[in-house]
Amino acid sequence: MQLLALSSFVAALFAGALAYPSAAVNITARAPASFVHPGVLLNTAQLNFIRSKVNAGAQPWSNAYTTLLNEQLLSQSRTPSPRSVVNCGPSSNPNNGCTDERQDALAAYGNALAWYVSQDSKYAKKAISYFNAWSGVITDHTGDNAPLQTGWSGTSWARAAEIIRYTYTGWASSDITKFENMLRNVYLPEVINGDARTGNWDLVMMEAAQGIAVFLNDKTSYDKAMNRYLGRVPAFVYLDTDGSYPKAAPGSPQTTKAQIISFWQGQTTFVNGIAQETCRDFVHTGYGIASIGHVAETSRIQGTDLYTGDIGTRLRYALGFHSLYQLGASVPSWLCDGTLTLGLGPVTEIGFNAMNTRLGFGMTNTQTLTQNQRPAGTNWLFLGWETLTHAGNTA
C-alpha cells in the first residue's frame, strides 16, 4: 500500500481551497426569544421545498420519497410496542425494548414526513398512534446504554412531534400534554447532563436535549444543551489551530496530553478533520458527525447559524477527511497504525448541504460520497431519510 505523506495528504484532501472563516461574532448558545415551530431539523419552508420537489417528480427527492414509503417502518399495519421500562445493556444486550423504541420513534418520524409530503391524514394518524402508545406507558430507561438509547430515541420523537403538532390539527391537546410530560420527565433528565464516556454519546444526547427543549419551549434546557455541545464539538473534531493535540471536552476526565491521546485510541498525529473515534471505527465516528450537523441545523432554524464559524469548519473538515477514506484512499501509516474500519453510513447530506449548497465550499470527496449513497435511508437508530429532507434544500 502506498503511504501518503502529511503534505500530500493535505493537498489530496482539500487541494488548498478551504480556508478558515473569520471568528464568528457574538455566537452564543442562547435560545431565541420565541422558538420557531416546526423547528427541529426542519422548518416549514424546508418541508414545503421537499413537497414541491416530490410533487414535481424531481430527483433525487422523488426516488428518496419512494424509498421512504417502501420502508417497512412505514407499513400501515405495523403497530407500536411500548413498554414501561426500556432496559439496554452494552450493544443493546440485554435488549428489552431498545430496538422497539428506536424503531417506533423512527416510524413516527417517517410517517410525519410522509404526511407532510402527501397530505394524506393516514400518515399523521399513524405517527400519532406511536406518540400516544409510548407516552401512556414508558416510565424509565435502565442499563448501561440508557443514556445513548434515550438520546437516539429522543431525537426521532422530537423531530416527528414537531411536524405533526404544528402542521396537523388532529392530535388531541390532552395527548400532546401527555407526550410533553413523557419528554420532560422520562427523556430530558436522562440526556441533559451529557455523558463523558465518548463523543458520539455526548453529541446525540445534546441533539435529543436540544430537540426536546424546542418542543417544550424550554429555553433553560436549550441553553444548557447548546453550551455542552459547543464544548464537545471541538473535543470531537480536531483542527490544527487547536495546537499539537486535541482539546479536552468540558468536564472530561481526560485532561493531560497522554490521557487525551489514549482517549483518541492512541493516535498521536493530528490533522484537520480527524475525529476522536476515527481510529475506533467510522460507524461511531459517523454518529458523532451526524449529530454535529443535526444540532447545527436546528440551531440555524432557531436563529443562530453555527455553520459560518468554528462548528461549521470542523464539520466540513470532518466530512472531507472521512469521505476521502470511505471512498477508498490508501491509509497512511501515521493514521490509526495504517488500518481503518470503514462504514461511515448515511451521515453526509445535512453537512454537505449546509457547507456546499448554502455556503459554497468545494467539497469534492464529500459530494462524491453523498451522491454515491443516495437515496440515504435510515440506520435504524436515529438517522432518517436525509436525501429527501436536505439534499439541495436551501430554505
Image (spheres, helix red, strand yellow):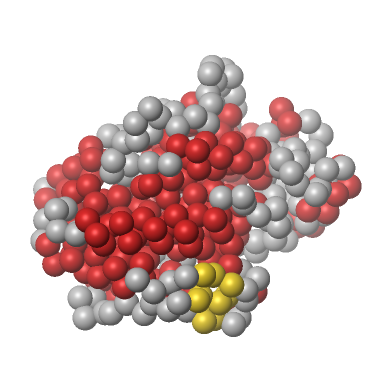
Q: Tell me the quadrant of the picture where the C terminus can be found.
A: top left
User: Residue at image x 80%, y 49%?
Assistant: 253
Q: Is residue 67 visible?
A: no
Quadrant of the rendered structure where residue 251 is?
top right
Is 139 placed left or right of 195 in the picture? left
Place of residue 361 in the rendered image (x, y in percent of width and height, measured from the top left): 46, 30
Give the answer, above or below, for where 248 lies relative to 123. above
Q: Is residue 163 visible?
A: yes
User: Residue at image x 75%, y 38%?
Assistant: 247
Is 378 placed left or right of 323 in the picture? left
Place of residue 337 in the rendered image (x, y in percent of width and height, measured from the top left): 79, 57
Give the answer, above or below, for where 233 lies relative to 326. above
User: Residue at image x 18%, y 66%?
Assistant: 125
Place of residue 59 in the rendered image (x, y in percent of width and height, measured from the top left): 22, 50
Give the answer, above or below, for where 381 lies relative to 259. below
Instruction: Pick whichever, 391 or 98, lies toward us.
Output: 98
Place of residue 336 in the rendered image (x, y in percent of width and height, measured from the top left): 76, 55
Instruction: Pick whichever, 222 or 357, lies toward us.
Output: 222
User: Residue at image x 24%, y 65%?
Assistant: 128
